[in-house]
């Protein structure tokens, strides 16, 4: 598992064997190292993989690794390679530039990380980008999930959540189904609500946000007025994704909102957790559950396997 192919400039050196490497949960471990020369600070490409035991957003994972290694993220984007989405992160550290192109396959995050001096980046950019988009697994599984999931039927469709989340249907009628899920691992870590409602026409984003705000306020949770839109991956069809700070019973929290419409059903996914500063792991798992729910709403096109 993990064999890959990629293009590298012919004159570059390569290490085909990395002694003493052990793959551990959550740690990006190198499986390939390619350098322009033996000079100190020479441009390099490092291929890594990391096994992740719980569902996270790949963007949060890569951002966290950059911060841990002292890189400042300056741009994030998504591209499609052979019909599959890949995350692109640009970062800087002192006088160096780094570009990470990452994707998920069967509970592993694969990263193509290219680094060069800022003064050399323009000269090497084309070759490094060609290498990044050529990077592919020899035997990909096509699975984008990190952990086992459960599909819950809702108004003729369904939604999936990680099995580590305790889920139950809170309300069900012929026109509305509401599903609640909690992550209670070493204390409360997060909450998910998914609603499927039959409507004639899709509601506007401001109307959907107002409905959610009313429900949260009634539960004693006060969301911030500002709810900036979140850049979303191109392989998932959504009406909109938004984030907001919330007063979570006196604690600083975070909320994410996602909306979709398909075949006469209005879908709403709302998640809550403590802030990233207060509970990093809980917040990352909350965002991961949110992403999974939005990606697997059905009836949908291009459903994940």
Image: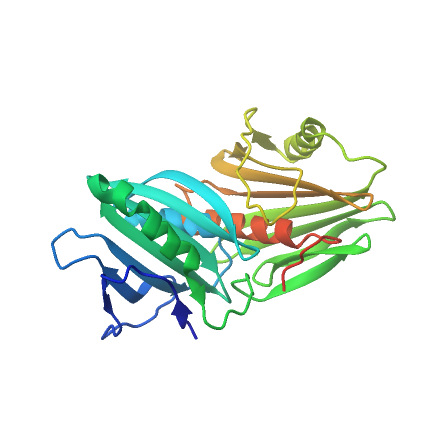
Seen from the viewer's position, the closer of residues 24 and 109 is 109
In the image: residue 198, left or right of residue 221: right
Seen from the viewer's position, the closer of residues 129 and 151 is 129
Seen from the viewer's position, the closer of residues 190 and 63 is 63
Q: Residue at x 63, y 64 (%)?
A: 305
The spot of residue 247 in percent (x, y) is 52, 32
Quadrant of the rendered structure where residue 20 is?
bottom left
Q: Residue at x 53, y 49 (%)?
A: 286
The spot of residue 215 in percent (x, y) is 69, 34
Question: Relative to residue 134, is residue 189 depicted above or below?
Answer: above
Q: Residue furthest right?
A: 174
- Residue 228 visible in image: yes
Question: Which quarter of the rendered picture does the N terminus lie within?
Answer: bottom left
Q: Residue at x 51, y 38 (%)?
A: 254
The spot of residue 291 in percent (x, y) is 57, 50
Q: Residue at x 82, y 55 (%)?
A: 156
Q: Residue furthest left?
A: 39
In the image: residue 296, left or right of residue 124: right
The spot of residue 274 in percent (x, y) is 48, 42
What colour-coding does the image apply? rainbow
Question: Relative to residue 90, is residue 148 depicted above or below?
Answer: below
Question: Relative to residue 113, is residue 13 depicted above or below?
Answer: below
């Amino acid at each position: 598992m993990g064999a890959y192919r990629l293009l590298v400039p012919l004159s570059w050196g390569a290490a085909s064997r990395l002694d003493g490497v052990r793959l551990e949960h959550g740690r990006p471990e190198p499986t390939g190292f390619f350098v322009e020369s033996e000079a100190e600070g020479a441009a390099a490409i490092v291929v890594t993989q990391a096994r992740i035991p719980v569902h996270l957003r790949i963007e949060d994972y890569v951002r966290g690794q950059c911060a841990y290694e002292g890189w400042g993220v300056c741009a994030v984007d998504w591209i499609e390679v052979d019909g599959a989405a890949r995350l692109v992160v640009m970062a800087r550290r002192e006088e160096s530039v780094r570009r990470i192109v990452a994707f998920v396959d069967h509970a592993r995050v694969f990263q193509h990380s290219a680094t060069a001096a800022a003064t050399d980046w323009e000269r090497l950019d084309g070759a490094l980008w060609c290498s990044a988009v050529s990077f592919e697994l020899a035997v990909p599984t096509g699975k984008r999930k990190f952990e086992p999931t459960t599909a819950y039927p809702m108004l003729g469709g369904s939604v999936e959540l990680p099995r580590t989340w305790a889920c139950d249907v809170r309300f069900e009628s012929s026109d509305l189904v509401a599903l609640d899920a909690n992550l209670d691992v070493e204390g409360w870590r997060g909450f998910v609500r998914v609603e499927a409602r039959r409507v004639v026409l899709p509601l506007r984003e401001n109307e959907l946000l107002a409905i959610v705000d009313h429900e949260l306020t009634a539960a004693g949770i006060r969301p911030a007025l500002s709810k900036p839109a979140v850049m979303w991956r191109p392989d998932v069809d959504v009406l909109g994704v938004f984030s907001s700070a919330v007063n979570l019973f006196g604690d600083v929290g975070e909320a994410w909102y996602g909306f979709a419409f398909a075949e006469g059903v209005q879908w709403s996914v709302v998640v809550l957790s403590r802030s990233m500063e207060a509970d990093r792991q809980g917040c990352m798992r909350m965002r991961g559950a949110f992403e999974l729910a939005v990606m697997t709403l059905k009836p949908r096109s291009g459903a994940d396997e």
